[in-house]
Amino acid sequence: MTKTQKQKTGDWGEQCAASFLLKKEYKIVARNFCVHKKGEIDIIAWHDKKYFGKTLCFIEVKTRKNSDDGSAERSVGKKKITSLFTAAHEYCMQYNIDIDHTAIQFEQISLYFVSGRLQINHYDIPVD
């Protein structure tokens, strides 16, 4: 099956995000972790956080071409965050991650390709 231009752009963005994270010393352990009909996580990585130490990070990647209007950030709403949490819980169950004793962080990387220049924004997703 051939990929659409949107899928190709998304794949390119995820590769750029992975390279960005590796430069920040994240250790990527999974990409495109999918829970059938419940959710998907673009990148899962371990990172040594300043205040929490070794932290399991679940990272959503959004890529936009020719736009810098914040649409990537706005595209991650309550429904997407709920599916991220569901998929993260499933990942922890499958890989025997003790969620009561493991620091966990949800993050978003937004990539914009504007006027031939890549802009990367990296955020923590607050958990209520």
Image (tube, rainbow, N blue to C red):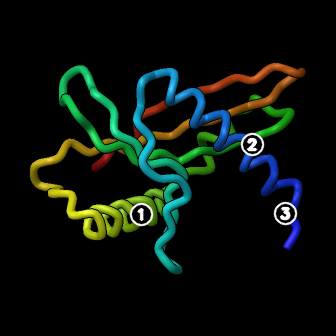
The amino acid sitting under disc 3 is Lys
Q: Nearer the viewer, mark 3 or mark 1?
A: 3
Which residue shows up at 45% across the image and 41% down it? 28
Q: CA distance from mark 3 to mark 1?
A: 27 Å
Q: Which residue is mark 3?
A: 3
For this rendering, which residue is in front, 98 or 69?
Answer: 98
The picture quadrant where one finds residue 116 is top right
* Label 2 Cα crowd, 10 Å radius (few <14 / some 14-19 / many 20+): few
Q: CA distance from mark 3 to mark 2?
A: 12 Å
Q: Which mark is residue 82?
A: 1
Whichever of callouts 3 and 2 sits on the residue coming sooner in the sequence is 3
Q: Which mark is residue 29?
A: none
The amino acid sitting under disc 2 is Trp
x, y (%) of residue 85?
37, 60
Q: Secondary structure at mark 1?
A: helix
x, y (%) of residue 100?
11, 54
Whichever of callouts 1 and 2 sits on the residue coming sooner in the sequence is 2
The picture quadrant where one finds residue 82 is bottom left
Q: Which residue is mark 2?
A: 12
